[in-house]
Image: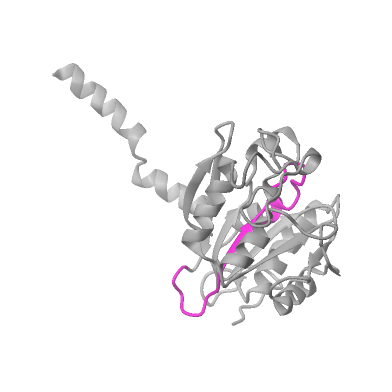
Amino acid sequence: MRILGILLALTVPLLAPTAPAAARAAADRPAVVGHRVIRHSVQGRRIVAWHLGEPGRPGAPRVVLIAGMHGNEGAPGGILRSLRDGPQIQGADLWVVPAYNPDGLAANTRRNAHGVDLNRNYPYHWTNLDGSYESGPRPASEPETRAMLRFLRKVRPRYILSFHQPLNGVDTDTKDQAFARRVARHLHLPRKTFSCGGVCHGTMTGWYNHRFRGAALTVEYDAHPSRTRMRRTAPRQVLDIFGAWRGRAGVDLVPGSQPQR
């Protein structure tokens, strides 16, 4: 019994973080109000959605930001990590997924570990594609796709921004064109039409825009955006789109940003 007691005493700290440890985690990432592992990738890597901002605040838009859908388009993930790791965020109910395709990011390849382009694997206008745009054996065949389907069905955001490279523009031929124009203006990106040569098969934005009332939009940066733009300028611009800001309620913590409603 005495040995069992010693083993339990050693095990408990490993099973549950202590209050000081939780406090340190909160201090390290004051913007984070929660997080959810929405699934694991083909190779077992976690896909994490981080919850930021003010959930439940009246009038605050619910927003999901997604980066790293294609593993060779890693730069925009810096925008989402900056939002996650920076000061508190006010004025929006915000979810960020900085590494949606973690296996592709680790290998610096467009597709996931099964060789499937996740942005051709969604169950809307899906067709059998090969090559760089390999769409998988069937719609939603990939664990990463099924994870995002479940997550978005549960969260049902008003707005989704899906960040990519290297086409350098905002797709304004979309469901909510006024929103698309606003995004392009705030991000200082040109307005473009991403038609995929006719029909964009099996895309996440196409599926969401068809199934839900909210608006999902593709944002493309160029091939080599600067680190300053990804880590400092673009995060502030993204918050401005939704009337959100960084800092404690009523306190401006970031020079040049102003609380707005």
- Which residue is at 72% across, 44% downward? 128
Residue 53 screen position, x and y as percent: 52, 66
How many numbered marks, from 0 up? Answer: 0
Whether residue 4 is visible, yes or no, is: yes
Left or right: 235 as drawn, with respect to 188? left
Image quarter hosting the C terminus: bottom right
Residue 202 screen position, x and y as percent: 68, 53
- Which residue is at 44% across, 71% downward? 56
- Which residue is at 82% across, 69% downward? 188
Q: Nearer the viewer, residue 48 or 39?
A: 39
- Which residue appears farthest toward the bottom when viewing the image? 261
Residue 22 screen position, x and y as percent: 41, 47
Q: Which residues are magenta?
A: 55-79
- Which residue appears farthest toward the front when viewing the image? 128
How is the protein colored in the picture?
Answer: one colour
Image quarter hosting the N terminus: top left
- Which residue is at 85% across, 56% downward? 167
**The stretch drawn in magenta includes residue 17:** no
Q: Nearer the viewer, residue 111 or 126?
A: 126
In the image, residue 115 sits, relative to residue 156, either above or below, namely above
Whether residue 30 is visible, yes or no, is: no
Residue 250 screen position, x and y as percent: 53, 77
In the image, residue 125 sits, relative to residue 128, either above or below, namely below
In the image, residue 177 sits, relative to residue 53, either above or below, namely below
Left or right: 94 as drawn, with respect to 239? left
Please tell me whether the stretch drawn in magenta is mainly helix, strand or loop: loop
**The stretch drawn in magenta includes residue 78:** yes
